[in-house]
Image (spheres, grey):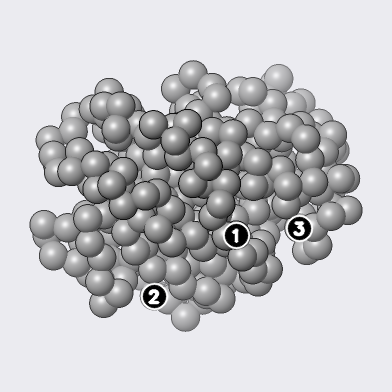
């Protein structure tokens, strides 16, 4: 099946957009027949037991990340496709690099499991993903999100939000329409989020997520070919107090218990992004870990 899909994917038209950071939206990503098989296989998602993480805080709400023990071959197809050579080729061509790996290339997806489910009233606050994976020592340069809910109405919210380089202002909203793939170039400026969901209890916002990595030595090549990117050796970092942009601020957010955790990571991120370069920040973090 994957071989049959290869030619289909190679013929997809990719229209890159550059604000607020490079991204492309690909509708009708899989042939309808294959997409409907995935949707049918997800009918029992509420019975899936292999839950790796359940998020519940004022910056992360009503989101579950699943392992793949409940996923049969059909349900693993989006993982194999988005993590496979055809999607990697799109990113390699854009970044003009010759090496790229995905989470699908490493055991247990490096701990970042691809299948995610969000429910009514769920949202994901503005954040920038980790800049480097310490387990397989690679630079994080791209992401993809594939939407597989059986239906989605725009009035239900749940858009993927792209924010400005400080994560304080929403620049673009992308509706999670069924069979839509969003790909984007990741750097320390790539703040994104999920807008608050307001859908029937019978509906879940289901997605497959994938990260992509390259060698550290490719940073200068990426800078040469792609403008307005910035790489630093930072952890996944949320913007404290402003889950969905500065206009979303509520006074009560100042007193949330987890603020120290979020503020500490934000301070580390800010220091590494603005005050030192990637190579030196990587060195400093390695010293800290040794201690």
Q: Is residue 256 visible?
A: no
Q: Nearer the viewer, residue 81 or 133?
A: 81
- Which quarter of the rendering shows the N terminus? top left
Residue at 56% across, 69% down: 163
In the rendered image, residue 121, in percent from the top left (x then y), is placed at 24, 63
Q: Earlier in the sequence, mark 3 or mark 2?
A: 3
Viewed as shown, does residue 158 lie left or right of 161? left
Marks 3, 2: nearer the viewer: 3
Viewed as shown, does residue 40 lie left or right of 1? left
> Dot 1, how many residues are within 10 Å of its Cα: few (below 14), some (14-19), or many (20+)?
few
Residue under label 2:
250
In the rendered image, residue 257, in percent from the top left (x then y), is placed at 38, 52
Residue under label 1:
14
Q: Earlier in the sequence, mark 1 or mark 3?
A: 1
Residue under label 3:
229
The answer to whether residue 47 is above or below residue 186 is above
Marks 1 and 3 in Cβ contact (< 8 Å): no
């Amino acid at each position: 099946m994957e071989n049959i899909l290869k030619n289909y994917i190679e013929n997809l038209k990719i229209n890159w957009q550059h604000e607020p950071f490079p991204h492309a939206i690909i509708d009708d990503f899989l042939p309808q027949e294959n997409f409907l098989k995935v949707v049918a296989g997800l009918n029992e998602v509420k019975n899936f037991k292999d839950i790796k993480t359940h998020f519940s805080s004022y910056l992360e709400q009503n989101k579950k990340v699943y392992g793949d023990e409940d996923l049969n071959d059909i349900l693993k197809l989006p993982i194999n496709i988005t993590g496979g050579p055809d999607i990697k080729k799109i990113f390699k061509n854009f970044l003009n690099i010759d090496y790229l790996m995905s989470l699908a290339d490493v055991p247990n997806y490096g701990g970042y499991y691809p299948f995610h489910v969000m429910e009514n009233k769920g949202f994901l606050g503005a954040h920038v993903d980790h800049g480097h994976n310490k387990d397989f020592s690679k630079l994080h340069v791209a992401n993809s999100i594939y939407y597989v809910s059986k239906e989605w109405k725009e009035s239900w919210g749940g858009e993927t939000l792209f924010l400005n380089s400080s994560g304080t202002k929403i620049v673009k909203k992308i509706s999670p329409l069924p069979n839509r793939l969003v790909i984007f170039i990741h750097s320390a400026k790539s703040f994104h989020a999920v807008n608050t969901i307001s859908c029937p209890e019978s509906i879940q916002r289901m997605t497959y997520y994938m990260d992509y990595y390259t060698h550290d030595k490719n940073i200068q090549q990426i800078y040469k070919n792609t403008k307005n990117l910035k790489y630093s050796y930072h952890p996944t970092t949320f913007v404290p107090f402003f889950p969905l942009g500065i206009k979303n601020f509520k006074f009560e957010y100042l007193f949330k218990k987890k603020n120290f955790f979020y503020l500490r990571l934000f301070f580390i991120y800010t220091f590494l992004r603005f005050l030192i370069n990637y190579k030196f920040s990587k060195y400093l973090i390695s010293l800290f870990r040794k201690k």
